[in-house]
Amino acid sequence: MSEPVKATLVMELNVECPECEHEFDLFQESQNDEGDLYRQVLDDDRWKIDADDRLKTYAYCPKCSTPFDVKGVIW
């Protein structure tokens, strides 16, 4: 039997701009400065399926520059 390998966890935090409907990943944008969004979503105390209000942030669309609020995570 071969040696075990490690799995890779891939995460996306997708939002859709309310103005132009462009979908983008907040984790990939500069809006995730210093991993702040990771900490909000993956906080151990909040790692519950019913805690959909764990995320509160301000975002802007990379396509049309529209600013908007983001609140909650759909699991």
Image (cartoon, rainbow, N blue to C red):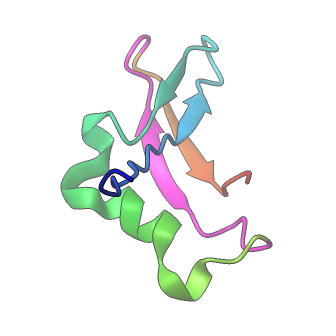
Could you tell me which residue is drawn at 44 percent across and 43 percent down? 10
Could you tell me which residue is drawn at 76 percent across and 70 percent down? 49
> Which residue, as the protein is rendered here, is positioned at the far front?
1
- Name which quarter of the figure residue 34 lies in: bottom left
Is 74 within the magenta? Answer: no
Is 54 within the magenta? Answer: yes
Magenta span of residues: 50-64
Left/right of residue 47 with respect to residue 49 in the rendered view? left
Q: Nearer the viewer, residue 22 or 8?
A: 8
- Name which quarter of the figure residue 51 lies in: bottom right
> Is residue 62 depicted above or below 45 in this figure?
above
Left/right of residue 28 with respect to residue 13 in the rendered view? left
Place of residue 69 in the rendered image (x, y in percent of width and height, measured from the top left): 56, 46
Could you tell me which residue is drawn at 35 percent across and 57 percent down? 4
Place of residue 70 in the rendered image (x, y in percent of width and height, measured from the top left): 58, 48
> Which residue, as the protein is rendered here, is positioned at the far bottom?
45
> Is residue 46 depicted above or below 55 in this figure?
below
Place of residue 15 in the rendered image (x, y in percent of width and height, measured from the top left): 58, 33
> Is residue 39 depicted above or below 73 in this figure?
below
> Is residue 29 depicted above or below 11 in this figure?
above
> Which residue, as the protein is rendered here, is positioned at the far right?
50
Could you tell me which residue is drawn at 48 percent across and 69 percent down? 42
Left/right of residue 21 with respect to residue 66 in the rendered view? right
Magenta segment, prevailing SS (helix, strand or loop): loop
The quadrant in which the C terminus is found is bottom right
Q: Nearer the viewer, residue 34 or 3?
A: 3
Place of residue 58 in the rendered image (x, y in percent of width and height, measured from the top left): 45, 48
